[in-house]
Amino acid sequence: MSILAELKSRLSGPLGKLVEDPAELLEMVRPSQDPKFGDYQANFAMPLGKQLGRPPRDVAAEIVAGLDVGDLCEPPEIAGPGFINLRVKDDRLVDRLAEAAVDPRLGVPEVESPRRFVIDFSAPNVAKPMHVGHIRSTVIGDALCRLFRFLGHEVTSDNHIGDWGTQFGMILYGYRNFRDPSAYDAAPVAELARLYRLVRQLMDYHEGKAQLPQLGERLEQREAALADQLAAAGDTPDKKTAKALRKAENDLTESRKEIEQLEAKLAAVEADPVLSKMAIEHAGIGEAVLAETAKLHAGDAENRRLWEEFLPHCLDEINRVYGRLNVTFDHTLGESFYQDRLAATVDDLIKRGIATTSDGAICVFLEGQNVPMLIRKQDGAFLYATTDLATLGYRMETFQPDAILYVVDHRQAMHFEHLFATARLMGMEGVRLEHVSFGTVLGGDGRPFKTRSGDTVGLEGLLDEAVRRAATIVAENDDAKPKGAELSAEERAAIAERVGIAALKYADLSQNRTSDYVFSYDKMLAMNGNTATYMQYAYARVRSIFAKGDVDVEALRAAPPAIDLSTPAERALGLAILRFGEALDLAALDYRPNQLTAYLFDLAACYSTFFEQCPVLKAPTDALRQSRLLLCDLTARVIRKGLELLGIEVVERM
């Protein structure tokens, strides 16, 4: 049990005498922001005093009087209006550090009541290259799998890939009409990706041509509406009117920009003789793609044969990217896996009275929702929601989970509200269903991250560029070493691969997952600040001490020396090391890996202060040298384990 968890446990006794359920109040026991206020601070006396109608200091005094922490802390102090300050005894810190030193888990126990999790993440459409939009789901989901496994839970990771939808209809149409046989034979994945992009471009062209008149009409309406508003507002509009005018002006600007962008895309096709000719010859490409998809789903022998030919190539490609990201899955069960369950799922919902017919389609109408969940179209086609319901049924039967986490971006919030509500109607009450949502990766312009041409940024290209930039940093650092470069070309390349990909993953994981963030190579590869590069450097710096001092680390761990925390820097580092378990609990509580990255950054900062103020190899006594070496080793082990739980590898030298 972490120190924080133990303090909460002991405080629950006296709190329980004042309130029926102290759980919410116990969440107000936290690490102190300033060491002068102790190591931990309980801030619940103020709201509790208000609730009880008593002075907060009196409430705090009553709680302290009933608190038994004499074996763990110095006498508690009451400060200000009722803050309870707690300082852990140095000998208890030393005892716990000694236990962590010989514990492969670094003093972090497994949970007392393990749960069974299914975590659904990444889920790309395999018929097209992975792009920047997949990075968040992939790395957040992988980190949660690693975190919950380490804490002692049973975790099943499932990559619910899109291997059955319209994208395969697009590739089938492209293969039949635009395939370059020699290119396909030489590099099938690259040719399939080209075909997908080409068909998408032609479909977008015809959809854009059809959409342009409607956009023009909307622009005219907005221009007319703004003119009327301006005329009515006069020369001195009030605040409410001025705000409405600004909104109308912004809407008008957005309409013009949307038309300009669409016209530019249409013009690009029309200006290219080859594309223009294709667009004319394949005017019905949208309907034809849907027909190819329908034939595949209906069991057409040739389309099925081609699908079975394409799929392994597509899977090889995404698995290669996962390999670079150091991400694996227990199962990769795509949409195709559940096709034989869809009709039965719909029939079951109808039989139960959960789904009903509406305008020829089958829908689930949910209380409090304005829009129903559509599970079968008028033409009999099933939808994404149908597949997710069938998938949920399979997971319940096969894995018997206590919780299923869907790591999917925030734009799918309504879909999951519908899915979870329908699952409850189906009787799935014993499982916790969670949409672990996340924000968008933005470019410097504050819009979703795109290439200069406006295309979605490919994930592998993103990895390559991060590694290329990391290689420059690694080379510069190596060349700047006092005795000259130490790394071979092969070592530099291997380190750059780790550093570059770690930087990309850590930059994402260090963000609050529900927030958008601006992508920046320079920030993510910075040698200072909360970056993977800084954390990897911190680890390598610790390891360099052992190499420089020719220290036998295994011997140090086998017979740990007595730990000395007599200086503030040593004590602060020891306490930071022991907060590892607290950070993991926080990260698991609300599925936020950034709680772990924030902790690691704080630990590295404590180590940096310790390193500056406390000589290690040149410590004044051998006993102090050994103590400080052990603190160094514990720091390195925690950083290594923490990064490992984020799916990030360390480097021994940089």
Image: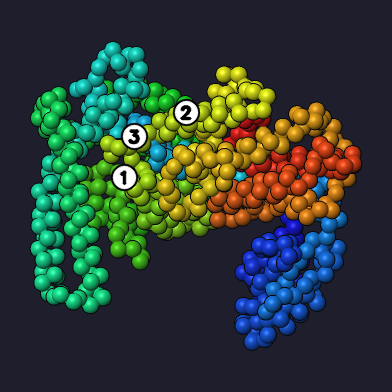
Residue holding disc 2: 468
Q: Is residue 19 left or right of residue 396?
A: right
What's the mark number on residue 190? Answer: none
- Find residue 227 and report its image quarter: bottom left
Which is nearer the eye, 204 or 398?
204
- Residue 641, position in %: x, y? 67, 40
Which residue occupies 63% across, 47% down? 600
- Residue 478, position in %: x, y? 60, 27
Residue holding disc 3: 164
Which residue occupies 37% across, 46% down? 444
Which residue occupies 36% across, 50% down? 446
Type of the residue with mark 3 = Trp
For the residues bearing labels 1 and 3, Cβ distance under 8 angstroms: no
Image height of 415 relative to 236, above or below: above
Image height of 406 relative to 299, above or below: below
Sequence-wise, the earlier of marks 1 and 3 is 3
Q: Is residue 137 left or right of residue 561?
A: left
Sequence-wise, the earlier of marks 3 and 2 is 3
Which residue occupies 84% across, 35% down? 556
Badge 3: few (under 14), some or many (20 or more) residues near its Cα, within 10 Å?
Answer: many
> Which element type, helix, strand or loop, lies under badge 3?
loop
